[in-house]
Amino acid sequence: MPVGGGNTQLNAWCENGEILFYIGSTDAYMDHSQMLGKLGRIRMNFSPNPFEKEFKQELRLKESEMVFSGENGFQLVLWTDVFHPVIHAEMKSKTPVNVTVNYETWKLNQEYTNDGKIVFAHRNNAEDQGREKAIAEQKAEPFRDKIPNPLANLTSGGMIQAKGFIPAGEGNGTYMGTPFRSIQLKTEHPLKKADMRIALRIAQDDSQEIWNAEVEKLLAETEKTAKKDREESRKWWNEFWNRSHIFINPSINPAEAARANVKTDSAAAAWQAGRNYQLFRYLLGCTKGAKFPVLFNGGIFNVDNPNGQAPEVRNWQSTEFMAQNQRLVYWPLLKTGDNDIMQPVFNMYRNTAELQKARAKNYWNIEGGIYPEGLSIYGLHSVYADPEIMVDCFGRCPARERTEYGHSGLIHLEYHYTSSLDFAYMLLEAARFGQEELQKQMPVIENVVKYFDNYYRKKKKERTGTELTEEGKLELYPSSALELYAGAKNPTDVVAGLQALVKGVLAFPKEKLTEEQFNYFSDVAQRLPEMPVTIKEGRKVLPPAETWELEGSQSNMEFPQLYTLFPFETLSFENPETLEIARNTWLYNAKGEAQKNYICWFQGGIYTAHLGITQEAASYALNKLLHPLGDRALPNTPARRFPAFWDNPSFCHCPDMDQGGAAMVGLQDMLIQTQGKHIYLLPAWPLNWDCDFKLHAPYNTTVSGTVKGGKLVQLSVTPENRKKDVVIMNGYQEDTAE
């Protein structure tokens, strides 16, 4: 079970009478950019064993603390400081107990200090070979000075102090197939109270000696401030939980609902879905203060591979930040109001804007900037493949020589830049919500639009001698509709993203833009291509693109046509006539069934919420949030003890973070959608689900309400003048008589 805060994450449990927990941080990259390492494992043993006859493990969400309880008033409380990287393990017992603490590692160096503490650390080399390899393979030497170097000399580790404990030797062992070394502290005599603190440091210090001094200083500074630090941490968590919530069927007995069979008790199933929404948001809340984003494939709570690989090894780790997956982790945080949790991913894009401009200038001699789909922490390609040969993972065509540097060497990623539009739009929406200043986001937004504008004008001129079509429009070719459709012209997802970005920028008051920005976006708006539309069996539907040359396997679960609904909302409740085209595409697409699974980053729940298909949206929400216990449960998929540790073997590593993000977005969009100036309320919310909710909307707006018995019995919109923009949908009516 997880507990954490302040970018320190623990995964804790009891086994054979011992308390164990892993120490993790989203910033602890060791040796290279593919290895986000654990900082070790703690094993605590108590004698006499307080768990022989009584045992309870409780995660107290409101306070963010884990409590283990046993006989004779025994209690061990684990919590992490939100504002200092310090872990606290506080024990009390009515009868004295002996305590041993083992620090176990399969990677880090460990030793005793002169005064009986344990220090553990891993220091990266001064030269990052992974970065050098990427620079050489991607021919990035001309703009080396723009490429960040975040891993050189990065030292990750900490120091353990427990008063009344003494060194007790070193040892070794094997756990879950992984050999480890251990170093131990033990109590000098039995105690009724014991406090252990672990101070952590992840920093690019000039030497190991400087790092040691800094971590010792942190331990000393926080020795007498534990009570104050706990109050400040609880205050932050209280504010975090007050920002937003979705409670489903809140009036039913929670203890009974938690134990109910979700396949036979529909009210309890909906309650559990709401609970799991909160639990997943908690995992994201534990990353405040992170430098690097939460990884889609396990975050930092991934542990223990039964095949004997180290605990930090994860599925798809070579892709690093795979933007198509990563976006889903962060989209729900707009409506929860968690802008501070979004900063690592925002900074990843903002801080490398100049690098992406340099890449575009170097490779293609154009103004603008584009971010690789597989994005490394250096801002370069993480999935580049052979520097000279292009290959197709779908087997759609033979390998060929590379004709243009700068793009990925995998053909399904060569022109796949939808995620750049996606993240640029997320930054734009953060400004529209009022959580960010528009001009702080504009370097990313402007350069992404300029890339598509300038790159494809250049490509068209190379082919035909003219930059634009006869109608004066951009022709986006060669492009790609997500991964599946290569050699595409005017892909639907790309057109939708460009339209959303350009229209979104121009929707801001003119004074928020520079004159140059306003003129440029007004100009480019005139030459954006139209959304591709075709007729199938008498119905208007969206094709993946205007034309395409290579089509991949539909089992890859992508649906580029419906990026018009999410994330870009170019088709929405604002225009029912065009929304019907998206509805036809979902309902009558012959290849669409392959896209309608619910696991991992499948987005059917989001699409159906945006189409107002209530029962189908509810089914997706239940199956995603209750996975694997829902009525569409996949066989042989394990249910984890912690309900938000979703497991999808062969998909994204457990806990599947993009499954959680997609589930959150889908549930939010069933309650509230924020298209244009309007706030569409309850567009896909079932009449038989009671709910208390509080969510954020654009223009510094919060919307809270209560749904009961199929009626909206309470609605509060702040500021009040935004209430005029609320559109209540789906058969609901505001009835505040209760």
Image: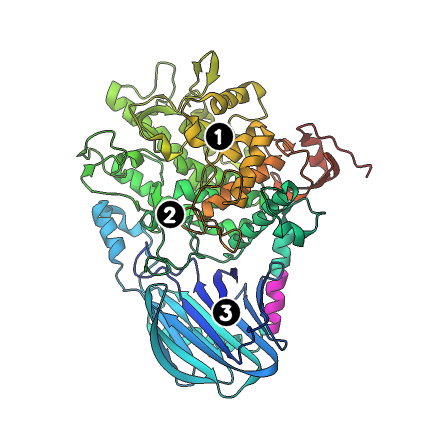
Q: Which residue is mark 3?
A: 86
Is residue 109 visible in the rendered image? The answer is no
For label 2, the SS is strand
- The dot on residue 109 is none
**Is residue 16 rendered to the left or right of residue 395?**
right
Extent of the magenta region: 227-235
Q: Amino acid at mark 1?
A: Ala
Q: Nearer the viewer, residue 105 or 562?
A: 105
**Badge 2 or badge 3: first in the primary sequence:** 3
- Disc 2 to disc 1, C-alpha distance: 24 Å
Q: Residue at x 82, y 36 (%)?
A: 737
For label 1, the SS is helix
The part of the image, by quadrant, that contains residue 358 is: top left
**Is residue 385 rendered to the left or right of residue 273?**
left
Q: Amino acid at mark 3?
A: Val
Q: Position of residue 309 (x, y in %)?
A: 32, 59
Q: Could you tell me what secondary structure mostly forms the magenta stretch?
A: helix
- Asked whether residue 229 is drawn in magenta, I would say yes
Q: Which residue is mark 1?
A: 500
